[in-house]
Image: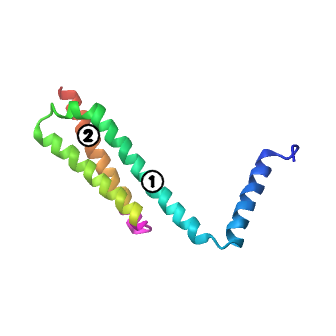
Amino acid sequence: MRNVNPFLRNLMILALIALAIVVLNQETALATAGTLVRFAFFIVLGVVAYSFWRDIARHEIQTWQSRPTRVLYAAVGLLVLDIGWYAVVGVTGQDLFVFFVVAGIAVYVGARTWLDQKRLY
């Protein structure tokens, strides 16, 4: 087994795991674990974003006027709703196109507001 190519060895390990899942009829458990990992990923993204906001951005945003602050928070809120919609519903087709358009608009508005305020202060 030492002379086996690592790529082939890893493929054999994956094949054994897949065979065990099929033989033991654990597809439902695997799907559940996948869903939990997907939600955990979005929770981790949220925690990292909150930590960035709390440690760095909040102090700078407090110096802005109220309108740009509301625009930035609205853009972030829209992006969070859009990503949540993608995570819960699992969009496809035209809904996927709408997801990317809304995410692009939210990111553009947030970035544009941020850069405009950095130029002013």
As shown in the figure, which amino acid type bears the numbered disc 1? Ala
Residue 112 location (% of width, % of height): 26, 40
Q: Is residue 7 above or below residue 21?
A: above
Give the quadrant of residue 101. bottom left
- From the image, state whether disc 2 or disc 1 is nearer to you: 1
Report which residue position mark 1 lands on. Answer: 40
Report which residue position mark 2 lands on. Answer: 112
Farthest residue in the left direction?
A: 66
Q: Is residue 10 above or below residue 36?
A: above
**In the image, 117: left or right of 19?**
left
Quadrant holding the C terminus:
top left
Residue at the (45%, 53%) spot, across then down: 40
Farthest residue in the top direction?
A: 121
Residue 16 lies in the magenta-colored region: no
Residue 27 location (% of width, % of height): 61, 70
Residue 117 location (% of width, % of height): 20, 32
Q: Is residue 23 above or below residue 114?
A: below
How far apart are the two marked residues, 2 and 1, measured between alpha carbons? 30 Å
Kindly state the secondary structure of the residue where label 1 is placed.
helix
**46 and 102: which is toward the camera:** 46
Residue 34 location (% of width, % of height): 53, 61
**In the image, 31: left or right of 21?**
left
As shown in the figure, which amino acid type bears the numbered disc 2? Arg
**In the image, 99: left or right of 110?**
right
Residue 94 lies in the magenta-colored region: yes
Residue at the (48%, 60%) spot, across then down: 36
Name the N-terminal-most of marks 2 and 1: 1
For the image shown, how many numbered marks are present on the structure?
2
Kindly state the secondary structure of the residue where label 2 is placed.
helix
**55 and 103: which is toward the camera:** 55
Q: Is the C-beta separation of discs 2 and 1 under 8 Å?
A: no
Q: Which residues are magenta?
A: 89-98
